[in-house]
Image (spheres, rainbow, N blue to C red):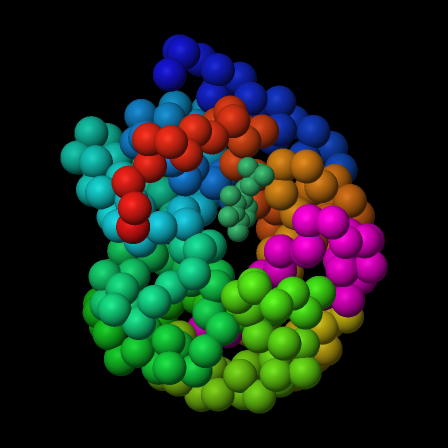
Amino acid sequence: MQEGKVAARWRAVAREFESVAKAGAHVLAVGKTYPAECVIEAADAGAARFGENYVQEAVEKIERVRALRPDLKLEWRLIGPLQSNKTRVAAQYFDWIESVDRLKIAQRLSEQRPPELGPINVLIEVNVDGEATKSGVAPDELAALAQSVATLPNLTLRGIMVIPAPEGDAAASFARARALFEKLKERYDTVDTLSMGMSADWREALEAGSTEVRIGSAIFGARDYSKKKAV
Ligand SMILES: *Cc1c(COP(=O)(O)O)cnc(C)c1O
């Protein structure tokens, strides 16, 4: 890592974000494949919320950040798929799980959340373009899953997360996500988060009503997957 690059990129993104975002929206810094030192550099430049895709990588990183810098109070959010054999550790380490798409996962998180940490915040991932290979509930299954999640004692339903199809019409996907979010918000007081937009399209996503943009490469740099361990 070259000194200062992450901090400079974070500041540039944050500055532009502040000039266009509505109150209540925020940037999630997505650090997958990047080490704890990069997270610390972003945090020292002002980032407070961090997204991770892989539970094992995240746990090691969180532990290392805590060991190196116990003064930092960071929020950690899981944005990658969650398997049922990882729910216990996820419920211990994350403040938010943004990729819930099955009741079984939600039930396990609620059962396994350590009570002293308070409820875990949950977004339901919606497969807004109906892609065959993608995780997330179908739009017409959202209402039923939301209803079940809302009854679980140690979870707080906060909204939805979407990842539009890479080759699709992003504006149409964002608009569909927005409509689903507004409907959910009418029904549940706790719902306030529409997570959509990444490095390439976060400006359009904000325009379409996103309250959380998840930005990785524009802050940390291009990712190198060749060194990543299988998780
Ligand atoms: C990696 C990732 C991001 C960040 O992607 P960039 O294009 O690097 O900004 C956002 N959301 C999810 C779900 C991701 O997996």
Residue pictured at 78% horizontal, 44% vertical: 204
Where on the picture, by quarter, is residue 35? top left
- Closest to the observer, 133 or 17: 133
Question: Is residue 123 in sight in this rendering?
Answer: no
> Residue 162 placed where, x, y %?
62, 60
> Relative to residue 94, is residue 40 depicted above or below?
above
**In the shown orientation, is residue 183 left or right of residue 101?**
right
Does residue 41 appear to the left or right of 116 in the view shown?
right
Q: Quadrant of residue 89?
A: bottom left
Residue 85 percent coordinates (x, y):
25, 69
- Can residue 97 be seen in the rendering of this structure? yes
62 above or below 196? Answer: above
Position of residue 218 measured from the top left corner of the image (x, y, whole percent): 58, 29
- Give me the residue at 48% from left, 61% from top: 98
Q: Is residue 79 above or below residue 47?
A: below
Ligand 1 rendered quadrant: top right
